[in-house]
Image: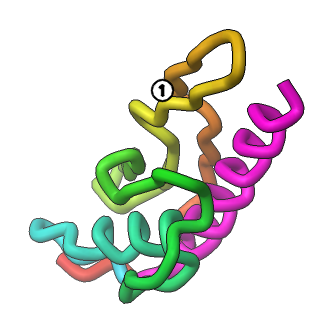
Amino acid sequence: MGYSIYLYQSLLNAVSGAARYAARVDFDEPNHSFAASVKNMAVYGNPVGGGAPLAPGLATGNISVTWTYDAKSVPATVTVGITGYAVNAVFQSFLWTGKPSVTVRYAGSYKS
């Protein structure tokens, strides 16, 4: 049980850091190449990627990056979350999808 709590906290820290990064990164419409750097930030702790993941078995495929637009079609919020991350505890396995996740207001540059 303690290991599962440790992993959850590691994932929460990872998506929190990525969400802070996503709040100020350049939002490039329509390519959305910024999403790859946000995923790398969540997994590796840097936008370029590489190295050991922040949590065991975490991959960029386990990170979701979604956003909302305001009435003027400008990005309003960005959400970074975990999807499909399996935790093999001693007596039970868990599959975390949609949690943890962090939503932040977008404050970066918008490129259309």
Q: Which residues are magenta?
A: 1-25
- Which residue is at the far top? 91
Quadrant position of residue 21: bottom right
With 58 as the anchor, is 15 left or right in this view? right
Magenta highlight: main SS: helix
Q: Which residue is mark 1?
A: 97
Q: Position of residue 16 (x, y in %)?
A: 68, 59
* Residue that lies at the very extreme toward the left in this rendered image: 30
| Callout 1: SS | loop
Can residue 90 be seen in this snapshot? yes
Look at the image and say whether residue 9 sits in the magenta stretch.
yes
The three-letter code of the residue at mark 1 reads Thr
Query: Who's the residue at 11% across and 66% down the image?
Result: 30
Depth order, front residue of 27/61: 61
Query: Is residue 67 at all visible to an observer of this figure?
Result: no
Instruction: Name the residue: 35% across, 61% down.
Output: 74
